[in-house]
Amino acid sequence: MTDDSIHAAQRLTSVRAAIDRVARLTDRNGDAINLIAISKTQDAAAIRPLIAAGQRVFGENRVQEAQDKWPALREAHADIALHHVGQLQSNKATEAVALFDVIHGLDRPSLLTALARAMDAAGRRIPCYIQVNIGAEPQKGGCAIADTPALIAVARSADIPLLGLMCVPPADVEPAPYFALLAKMAREQGLPRLSMGMSGDFETAIMLGATDVRIGTALFGERQAPARPVPGSGRGMIRNAPAR
Ligand SMILES: *Cc1c(COP(=O)(O)O)cnc(C)c1O
């Protein structure tokens, strides 16, 4: 084993141990918590050791980047599940439906329509989470809290399989009230799963009922300094630009 793969295996073991510990506090089995390794900006060389260590569920936030990386990585491991997290453009719906197994960022009627159409065309239903803008932050994706029940109803009538709700709480404040609010909304809507918790707050999220945690930094180490869009460069998002 190389140094890299030893480190990856160690990080995976310690994250899983932390998940197990907190799951037990809430009378759940750690195995019931789905760990999604967020591999955005990570290259194949960084991802392979985690696959070798047994990780099978990964998450990406950019369709193009995922298309570039994952077909080759998946070839040897047909059991890998790929999740899309974060903002998804409606014009990427067809590609997203072809590539991903779960979509976490369903947050508006236009995207819902595009996804429903893409699923019909592909003859494949992709389970989704409704992303809620739980802190009502104008710069963030996610459906407004007040609009969420209606979006859920439309998704159900469009035959989009809904797993649950997803959120990214505001940065730099205590996340627990936001996780608790998301859990309450999911309960009220009869949705069983909660995609919440990242490297800095996954233990809190699990205490409050998270079923799916999305963890990047704690598994891969710090991401490279994010590239910024160049002003005035038209479509010019630099490749590997960060998630919002
Ligand atoms: C990047 C990202 C994560 C992972 O964040 P870390 O802090 O690196 O664990 C989780 N969820 C979403 C939506 C992300 O974009």
Image (cartoon, rainbow, N blue to C red):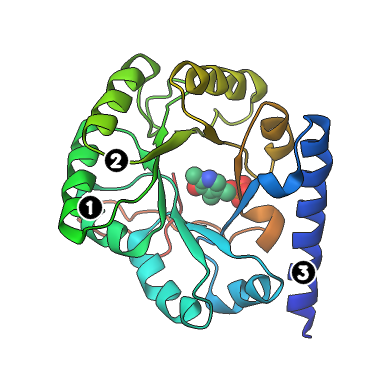
Up-down relation of residue 216 to residue 66 (above or below): above
Q: Amino acid at mark 1?
A: Met
Give the Cα distance between marks 2 and 1.
Answer: 8 Å
- The crowding category of the residue bearing disc 2, from other C-alpha atoms within 10 Å (few below 14, some 14 to 19, many at least 20), is many
Image position of 79 (left or right of 142): right
Quarter of the image for the N terminus: give it.
bottom right
- Mark 1 — residue? 119
In the image, 191 versus 202, the foreground residue is: 191
Measuring from the top left, give residue 227's x and y in whole percent.
45, 58
- Mark 2 — residue? 160
Q: Amino acid at mark 3?
A: Ala
- Count of labels shown? 3
The residue under the point 29% across, 40% down is 160
Q: Amino acid at mark 2?
A: Ile
In this view, the mark in front (1 or 3): 1
Image position of 12 (left or right of 112): right
If you read the primary sequence from the N terminus, does the residue marked by circle 1 or circle 3 appear first? 3
Q: Is mark 2 within 8 Å of ligand 1?
A: no
Measuring from the top left, give residue 18's x and y in whole percent.
81, 46
Give the Cα distance between marks 1 and 3.
Answer: 36 Å
In this view, the mark in front (3 or 2): 2
- Mark 3 — residue? 9
Mark 3 and 2 residues: CB-CB less than 8 Å, in contact?
Answer: no
Quadrant in the picture for residue 146: top left
